Amino acid sequence: MNDIKKIRHPQFKNIPERPSGRKPNWIRVKAPVSEGYRETKSLMKDLKLTTVCEEAACPNIGECWEQKHATVMILGDTCTRACSFCNVITGKPDKINLSEPKNIAKMVLIAKLKHVVITSVDRDDLLDGGANHFANCIKEIRSMAPNTTIEVLTPDFRNKIGAVEIVVDAKPDVFNHNLETVPRLYKAIRPGSRYYHSLRLLEMVKELSPSIFTKSGIMVGLGESKEEIIQVMEDQRSAKIDFLTIGQYLQPTTQHATVERYVTPDEFFEYEQIAYSKGFLKVSSSPLTRSSYHADKDFEILKEKRMNLLKSDQ
């Protein structure tokens, strides 16, 4: 293990390498080389913004950045937790950048974004878990780019009383929080979190503001069963979650959790059909699906479906 990995993931210091098997053809993507990609990269650098696209080594970065769609990661690039699936740096975070909300709003304005996604690292060191910073980002974007729709992908705000309410009060259009995996695998994959706490968080959003779309995602290929995935879908619908994403887990480094299996495109399609039968408004299920993949297009579909449902109820 080299020095960069030691700095980035200290939790893996004494863990031997455990490489996953060769990726199948359907999981391969082209290296990002387009002009649009370079322009987006330059804009993020100029405004000193961090993106989860880079920090989490997202396989869709070339496609998304070419279309000037990026997921901004606020509250620094260092997470206070050490999930075994995640490529984000683990350690002691820096102080909050108070100019970040305004810089994000500038980016939205310059890039002429119709839809923006804001996520963050876990900040267990902060009393509010970073909730007020999320709210400030939403307010700045509303001020500078009022026609842009806003999606937040938040941490679980565990043990942060009132944090969910702060973000909901700022009125994002979509509130996303990922369950990531099935309950049985939480201890190994997401040890700092609790499945039913995450589920309850999304349920609370709906209780506080029924008009906000809620969204959640899971990874597959970590050793879960089909029955467990279907149970997660049922749990999510019980919490009135609107939108589901399902994607293949990919091992960021050889110290991270291994890929137990590469799920086939046909299986992803089956999960999509099952999810729609459960009542989700929008489902994205494919090997390369990620939380924010095609989020702008998906939001337009969600709005249209919501309008049709409201009309049918009248």
Image (spheres, grey):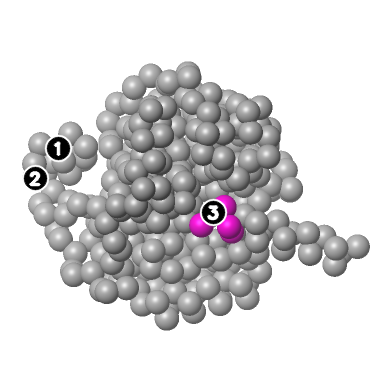
Going from the N terminus, do you reach mark 2 or mark 3 first? 2
Magenta-colored stretch includes residue 273:
no
Q: Which residue is mark 1?
A: 4
Determine if residue 54 is in view: yes
Looking at the image, residue 49 sits to the left or right of residue 110; the answer is left
Q: Percent from the top left, x then y, of residue 69? A: 48, 47
Residue toward you, 103 or 227: 103
> Tag 1, which secondary structure?
helix
Of the two numbered discs 1 and 3 in the rendering, the one whose residue sits closer to the viewer: 3
Amino acid type assigned to the residue bearing label 3 in the image: Ala
Looking at the image, residue 260 sits to the left or right of residue 210; the answer is left
> Tag 3, which secondary structure?
helix
Q: Which residue is mark 2?
A: 1
Looking at the image, residue 141 sits to the left or right of residue 268; the answer is right
Quarter occupied by residue 163: top right
Q: Which residue is mark 3?
A: 295
Going 16% across and 41% down the picture, which residue do you hit?
Answer: 5
Numbered disc total: 3
Q: Quadrant of the N terminus?
A: top left
Going 46% across and 51% down the picture, which residue do you hit?
Answer: 67
Residue toward you, 268 or 82: 268
From the viewer's perspective, is residue 89 above or below residue 144?
Answer: below
Quarter occupied by residue 219: bottom left
Extent of the magenta region: 294-298
Q: Percent from the top left, x then y, of residue 78? A: 32, 32
Q: Percent from the top left, x then y, of residue 216? A: 53, 55
Amino acid type assigned to the residue bearing label 1 in the image: Ile
Q: CA distance from mark 1 to mark 2?
A: 8 Å
Q: CA distance from mark 1 to mark 3?
A: 32 Å
Going 56% across and 33% down the picture, which residue do you hit?
Answer: 109
Amino acid type assigned to the residue bearing label 2 in the image: Met
Q: Percent from the top left, x then y, of residue 306? A: 74, 59
